[in-house]
């Protein structure tokens, strides 16, 4: 009798646990993109939209809101106390300052946890309870860090060779001149001088920063330009040897054992792989359920052909983290458990509404091949264009007697302007595009909140929310 009683009790306990699992569930959403792609503005707006979803947010495509099933959203203590807290309050303060300014970009990993309480629609859930709570963890991390994954498959000398092979663009190799000069004084057979290594590393890092300032996007190693807590650490002090030095190493069969300098550079590179790249994948990347990748196609179009082509290369390189091709080692160690991935072209308030579909087509043409690989791995993907905080208004004007859509906004200098920013090409532009058609827009100042509980104006954040969370809020 006792054993019958205890098995009934066990069954009830298990049913209770199962029931709780049904009504209290969890999603880990990751947001990435290269720096300035709009991650901070996006997460700030997303939290703002969710917190104000019931009162003032405009989210018609987010079904839990349009079906009036959302009960409330609140912020909760984040799970990982070793990771920075996403600075939502500071972001809102900046946006509401006088004059308003954009939130300060984050340059490392940060996290925020939200609890979303809603009325169940799923019959299974309704059997257990009328309401459920979804715990949503959002992690923001720099896309630059994903550019480092392919470095795991190279050794130091291969990486050096790879670096010069990728400098085919003349403007980039001109930028590398002062770095080459700094390297000339380096004698591979001399004793190791740590100060000299540090100085050359600084010149190399400066070269990477200069590339970034010129609008180049494929910057490797990623931590050199976004070091986070590693700024100044020796693990970020190494650099590629010149083609001549590589040739002399190969011809004279120089190995680490007979060049202390080569030995040190080798070991720094290995430490970078072991202590910087791998831990990021182990600690964060593996745990994400869903991923949003922001791509700032419009600023790249604004910067010109070199920037756009480099962005395209960088994004495809970055997407390598979501499919591994034939590399089983990487797959075993790092493969994420992501089931949905969204590609999102950011800052779409910089173009007129009739150009929005072109922006999505352009984004799709940039990522076409990588996307097919990712889908093949069973991940559901979608592309969209959105604006985290709509900083422009749409108006009409006439051009050659025809009405055209124009944008009105306030420049960062505080000047009100009306402009036609240009047509967005539907696919990656050919050389001719850059000669014949300009594409230009200035940065806009954001618009502050009307009052404390009003949500910021946006474009299509509700589509993003529906894709990444809709099925979890049924
Ligand atoms: P992060 O480095 O990826 O976090 O990028 P941020 O979110 O800091 O965005 C970089 C800059 O892009 C901001 O300072 C704004 O100037 C601009 N920006 C970001 N989102 C938007 C948007 O939705 N609309 C407009 N007009 N500008 C944006």
Image (tube, grey):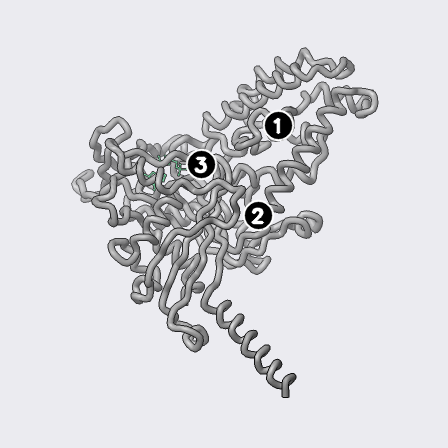
Q: Is mark 2 within 8 Å of ligand 1?
A: no
Q: CA distance from mark 2 to mark 3?
A: 18 Å
Is residue 26 left or right of 265 when viewed as pictured? Answer: left
Q: CA distance from mark 1 to mark 2?
A: 21 Å
Q: Is mark 3 within 8 Å of ligand 1?
A: yes
Could you say whether the residue bearing mark 2 is in a helix, strand or loop?
A: helix
Percent position (x, y) of residue 11?
57, 79
Against 219, residue 459 (above or below) is below
Q: CA distance from mark 1 to mark 3?
A: 20 Å
Percent position (x, y) of residue 110?
48, 42
- Residue 236: give its label: 1
Q: Residue at x 40, y 49 (%)?
A: 360
User: What residue is pinned by disc 3?
Assistant: 106
Q: Residue at x 62, y 36 (%)?
A: 276
Are circles 2 and 3 on residues that touch, CB within 8 Å? no
Percent position (x, y) of residue 308?
46, 35
Looking at the rendering, in which quadrant would you find the C terminus?
bottom left
Against 238, residue 455 (above or below) is below
Q: Residue at x 54, y 19 (%)?
A: 174
Residue 462, quarter of picture: bottom left
Is residue 360 left or right of 2 when viewed as pictured? Answer: left
- Residue 285: give its label: 2
Mark 1 or mark 2: whose residue is earlier in sequence: 1
Mark 1 or mark 3: whose residue is earlier in sequence: 3
Residue 129, quarter of picture: bottom left
Residue 70, quarter of picture: bottom left
Report crowding for label 1: few under 14, some 14 to 19, many 20 or more residues within 10 A (C-alpha).
many
């Amino acid at each position: 009798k006792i054993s019958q009683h205890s098995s009934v009790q066990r069954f009830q306990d298990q049913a209770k646990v199962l029931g709780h699992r049904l009504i209290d569930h969890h999603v880990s959403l990751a947001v990435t993109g290269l720096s300035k792609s709009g991650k901070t503005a996006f997460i700030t707006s997303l939290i703002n939209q969710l917190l104000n979803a019931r009162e003032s947010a405009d989210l018609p495509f987010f079904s839990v809101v349009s079906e009036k099933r959302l009960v409330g959203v609140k912020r909760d203590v984040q799970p990982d106390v070793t990771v920075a807290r996403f600075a939502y309050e500071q972001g809102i303060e900046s946006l509401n300052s006088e004059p308003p300014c954009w939130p300060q970009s984050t340059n490392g990993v940060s996290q925020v946890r939200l609890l979303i309480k809603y009325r169940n629609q799923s019959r299974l859930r309704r059997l257990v309870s009328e309401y459920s709570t979804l715990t949503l963890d959002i992690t923001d991390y720099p896309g630059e860090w994903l550019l480092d994954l392919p470095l795991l498959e190279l050794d130091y000398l291969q990486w050096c060779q790879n670096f010069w092979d990728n400098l085919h663009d003349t403007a980039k190799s001109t930028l590398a001149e002062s770095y080459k000069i700094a390297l000339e004084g380096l004698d591979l057979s001399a004793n190791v001088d740590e100060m000299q290594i540090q100085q050359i590393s600084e010149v190399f890092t400066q070269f990477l920063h200069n590339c970034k300032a010129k609008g180049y996007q494929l910057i490797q190693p990623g931590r050199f330009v976004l070091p986070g807590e590693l700024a100044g650490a020796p693990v970020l002090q190494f650099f590629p040897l010149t083609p001549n030095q590589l040739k002399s190493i190969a011809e004279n069969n120089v190995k680490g054992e007979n060049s202390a300098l080569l030995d040190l550079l080798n070991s720094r590179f290995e430490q970078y792989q072991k202590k910087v790249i791998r831990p990021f994948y182990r600690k964060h990347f593996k745990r994400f359920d869903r991923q949003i990748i922001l791509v700032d196609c419009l600023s790249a179009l604004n910067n010109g052909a070199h920037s756009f082509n480099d962005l395209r290369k960088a994004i495809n390189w970055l997407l390598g983290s979501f499919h591994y091709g034939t590399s089983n080692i990487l797959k075993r160690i790092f493969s994420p458990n992501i089931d949905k991935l969204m590609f999102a072209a950011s800052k779409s308030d910089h173009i007129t509404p009739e150009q929005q579909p072109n922006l999505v087509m352009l984004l799709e043409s940039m990522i076409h091949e990588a996307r097919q690989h990712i889908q093949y791995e069973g991940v559901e993907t979608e592309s969209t264009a959105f604006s985290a905080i709509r900083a422009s208004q749409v108006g009409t004007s006439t051009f050659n007697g025809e009405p055209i859509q124009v944008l009105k906004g306030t420049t960062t200098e505080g000047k009100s302007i009306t402009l036609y920013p240009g047509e967005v090409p539907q696919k990656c532009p050919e050389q001719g595009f850059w000669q014949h058609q300009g594409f230009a827009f200035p940065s806009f100042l954001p618009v502050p909140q009307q009052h404390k509980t009003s949500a910021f104006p946006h474009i299509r954040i509700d589509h993003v929310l529906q894709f990444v969370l809709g099925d979890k809020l049924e």
